[in-house]
Image (cartoon, rainbow, N blue to C red):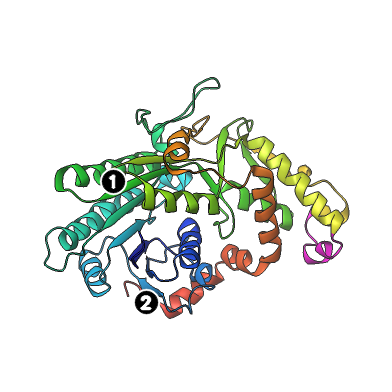
């Protein structure tokens, strides 16, 4: 596609969404980007600071559950493309608060699809072309054994957590709007993302923050659970390829070709942090509570904790279809991607401290009234 698009990015102030907004703004500067985010606990406008003054960018504070707002934004901004990231995504939270996941991930996705259908299929103001891209997860496929082949696009859905079940339901809704109403859609299912701006409830940023502040590194069970790790910018490139080259109605797996046990991730993280402190004497003064600041091993913080309920043992993505049909290949292996992530965390202490102490929430509450 060469003509300028008017792109609505839902959940664009979150981790993956914000990385996508920056990626898309850099690569498609003629496209109009409208970022919609409810600014719940993981939404952070600081994630978008680098694009906030660009002429092709607009931020809208709103929730995808608000049908009237969706209609207004899509009509006023003449949206012809939606990239749908908005979701509750933390498995532990879904175990304790499943209702929020059903509302946002299932009901919210349906309301967004309904708004797209009204404008794109049932309106005189319909654009010449349109696309609804839905961002999903490998967790919809369930879990794998040690010798099982990786998930493909034809793997039977078998979600094992309320989060995974809510994403599976949203996947099916997107598919149904294509087959029933003719909505032009694509879907991507990704493996575990990591990289800049990730909220420190997820494994890698949590472990880095705890290591730098001298807090325990909690590892579920014996740490043998395996994940396929995908650097977030590789994910963004994969979505780009799906949107521009993928088959309408198609689903594509986007993976990192990086299967690691959780305990090996944590051990590698400890070694990398120790090495960083050895190379740069200034880090000891910057992070005095870190074991590495006093010459101790970061691995001394590793603490094994009770496994979470229904913990899937292994995820692995087979990205053959995206590779053969779209030319997708991740640029970063885990070593390079993790080093980029660690460097970013070391250089952006103000960002993660504001997230950890909640001060960024105070700023949002002062500047954005509830429901505004």
- Residue at horizontal 48%, vertical 26%? 144
In this orientation, which residue lies closer to the viewer: 295 or 57? 57
- Residue at horizontal 82%, vertical 53%? 292
Residue 344 image-quadrant placement: bottom right
Question: Does the magenta run of residues contain 284?
Answer: yes
Give the numbered dot on residue 173: none
In this orientation, which residue lies closer to the viewer: 167 or 58? 58
10 Å neighbourhood of mark 2: few (<14), some, or many (≥20)?
Answer: few
- The C terminus lies in quadrant: bottom left
Q: Position of residue 268 (x, y in %)?
A: 72, 42
Instruction: Tell me if I can see residue 347 in this picture.
Output: yes
The answer to which of marks 2 and 1 sits earlier in the sequence is 1
**From the viewer's perspective, is residue 250 above or below residue 346?**
above
Disc 1, SS: loop
Residue picked out by circle 1: 248
Q: Position of residue 258 (x, y in %)?
A: 60, 37
Q: CA distance from mark 2 to mark 1?
A: 39 Å
Disc 2, SS: loop
**From the viewer's perspective, is residue 179 above or below residue 200?**
above
Q: Which residues are magenta?
A: 280-290
- Residue at horizontal 25%, vertical 66%? 70
- The N terminus lies in quadrant: bottom left
Residue picked out by circle 2: 369
In this orientation, which residue lies closer to the viewer: 145 or 339? 339
């Amino acid at each position: 596609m060469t003509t300028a698009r008017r792109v609505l990015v839902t959940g664009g102030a979150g981790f993956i969404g914000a990385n996508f907004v920056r990626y898309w703004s850099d690569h498609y500067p003629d496209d109009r980007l409208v970022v919609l985010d409810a600014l719940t606990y993981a939404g952070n406008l600081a994630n978008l600071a680098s694009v906030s003054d660009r002429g092709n960018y607009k931020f809208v504070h709103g929730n995808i559950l608000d049908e009237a707002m969706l209609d207004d934004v899509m009509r006023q901004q003449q949206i012809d493309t939606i990239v749908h990231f908005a979701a509750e995504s933390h498995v532990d939270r879904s175990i304790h608060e499943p209702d929020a996941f059903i509302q946002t991930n299932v009901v919210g996705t349906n309301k967004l699809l309904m708004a797209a259908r009204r404008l794109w299929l049932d309106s005189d103001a319909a654009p010449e072309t349109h696309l609804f891209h839905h961002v999903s997860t490998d967790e919809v496929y369930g879990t794998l054994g040690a010798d099982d082949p990786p998930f493909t696009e034809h793997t039977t859905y078998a979600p094992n957590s309320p989060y995974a079940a809510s994403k599976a339901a949203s996947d099916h809704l997107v598919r149904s709007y294509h087959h029933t109403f003719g909505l032009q859609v694509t879907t991507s299912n990704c493996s575990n993302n990591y990289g800049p701006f990730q909220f420190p409830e997820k494994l890698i940023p949590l472990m880095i923050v705890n290591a730098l502040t001298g807090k325990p590194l909690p590892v579920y069970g014996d740490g043998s659970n395996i994940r396929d790790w995908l650097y977030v910018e590789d994910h963004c490139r994969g979505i780009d390829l799906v949107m521009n080259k993928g088959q309408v109605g198609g689903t594509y797996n986007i993976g990192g070709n990086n299967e690691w046990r959780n305990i090996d991730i944590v051990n590698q993280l400890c070694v990398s942090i120790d090495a960083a402190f050895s190379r740069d004497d200034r880090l000891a003064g910057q992070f005095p509570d870190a074991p590495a600041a006093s010459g101790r091993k970061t691995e001394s913080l590793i603490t094994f904790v009770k496994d979470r309920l229904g913990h899937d043992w292994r995820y692995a993505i087979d990205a053959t279809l995206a590779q053969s049909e779209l030319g997708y290949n991740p640029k970063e292996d885990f070593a390079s991607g993790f080093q980029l992530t660690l460097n970013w965390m070391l250089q952006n202490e103000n960002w993660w401290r504001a997230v950890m102490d909640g001060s960024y929430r105070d700023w949002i509450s002062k500047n954005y009234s509830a429901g505004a």
